[in-house]
Image: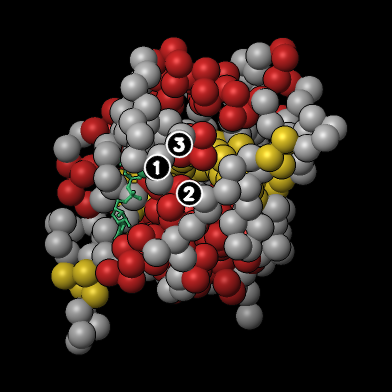
Amino acid sequence: MPAQITADMIIHDVVAQYPDTVKVFQGHGLPCTACAVGERESVAGGARTHNLQVEPLLADLNRAANGEPVVGLKPERKMPTGKGIPLQMAGQTGNKIRNVIAIMSGKGGVGKSLTTGLLAVALQRQGMKVGILDGDITGPSIGRMFGVTDVPVKEEDNTVTLPKSGSGIKIISMNMFLPNATDPVIWRGPMISQAIKQFWGDFDWGKLDYLLIDLPPGTSDAPMTVMQSLPLDGVVIVSSPQLLATDIVKKCIKMVQTLKGKIVGVVENMAYLPQADGSHMEVFGTSNGPELVALTGSPLLAQIPIDPLIAQFCDAGRIEDYASDEFTMLGNNFVKAIKIAR
Ligand SMILES: Nc1ncnc2c1ncn2[C@@H]1O[C@H](COP(=O)(O)OP(=O)(O)OP(=O)(O)O)[C@@H](O)[C@H]1O
Ligand SMILES: [Mg+2]
């Protein structure tokens, strides 16, 4: 009997049953196959979110599911790689790092550093080589999260060995260069930009599958430096139900779009507080997941709940010991999203 995909079917069920439909969703501009929303969103709902007509989509999905050729799909999206690399940097670390990804929000305290840490751990657990460049020069938090207090070491041959986390993630952060972790960095914008460029260009990161860059809030010096001077492959946007409503995350999304960056996915943090009876208390309001997806055209990688364990593990420098279903989903969806975006 021929496959019959209908508008009310859940996107992830369609993909699970008919893997050939992935290229149809992507070819119609729907990144739903790497999206937490796609777990419960129907084909019709996905089309609505992305302002598409459902009938042509359904027709192509059924063609693919039945092994028939599908024509006229949009070509795969290409990530902007290597744009604006200063010449002196191009030959150094850039050519050995396969994916340079910045984690941004615009808004402070929303979970950018947490998302950076969780993504790094997830990728490392999948067997990839990962590094984190802590781009928050005045408020670094990656070292504490991973319990790394070592400093970079200059070897006899003048190369510099970067500190590593317990599981082997290479990390560089401003705190490693301060006499005391509580010493302030009282610097103006150009010095912050220069420090980020040095973190990138003055150290040999070796071969990495992913270099994740944790950025401070705002849309000025640090994010601009990373977007304009580093060979950025993509950006992950972090938001929370309440914070999207403040418009600050939207400013950040528009900044990335204005500078022609590629948003590979969005993460909704502090999405809800799990209750003993299995229900979700939406502390910061209802989810903005579909709105984020519509705004960015990229998948919602995960909705991370408020979990006191997260704060405890971060404070204790044990982020690498954290485990949860949403965390697993974040890593899996991120890798899928990168493949879609490439
Ligand atoms: N889902 C969560 N559940 C519990 N605690 C969380 C959660 N997300 C973040 N936190 C805690 O909230 C604090 C802020 O998170 P984080 O440092 O990741 O935010 P940020 O966006 O990087 O902040 P900043 O703008 O200062 O860089 C941290 O102490 C972190 O451990
Ligand atoms: Mg931070």
Q: Position of residue 34 (x, y in %)?
A: 52, 57
According to the picture, the residue beneath numbered tag 1 turns out to be 181
Q: Between label 1 and label 3, give the one nearer the viewer.
A: 3
Q: Nearer the viewer, mark 2 or mark 1?
A: 1
* Residue 58 seen in the current view: no
Give me the residue at 27% from left, 37% from top: 107
Q: CA distance from mark 3 to mark 2?
A: 14 Å
Residue 312 in the image, given as x and y percentages of width and height: 33, 67
Q: Residues within 10 Å of mark 2 (few under 14, many from 20)?
A: many
Closest to the camera, between mark 3 and mark 2, is 3
The Cα atoms of the two marked residues, 2 and 1, are separated by: 10 Å
Q: Are marks 1 and 3 in contact (CB under 8 Å)?
A: no
Residue holding disc 3: 179
Residue at the image point whose x is 79% and y is 30% from the top: 158
Q: Secondary structure at mark 2?
A: helix
- Whether residue 223 is visible here, answered yes or no, is yes
Name the residue furthest right: 157
Residue 254: where, in percent of width, then height? Answer: 35, 26
Give, as a three-letter code, the residue at label 2: Gly
**Which residue lies most toward the front here?**
179
Q: Residues within 10 Å of mark 1 (few under 14, many from 20)?
A: some
Identify which residue is drawn at 52% across, 23% down: 195
Q: Is residue 184 above or below residue 328?
A: above
Compare residues 127 and 318 and report the one nearer the observer: 318
Q: Which residue is mark 2?
A: 143
Evaluate if marks 2 and 1 touch, with contact meaning CB atoms under 8 Å apart: yes
- Assign the N terminus to one quadrant of the image: bottom right
Would residue 200 be found to the left or right of residue 273 on screen? right
Q: Earlier in the sequence, mark 3 or mark 2?
A: 2
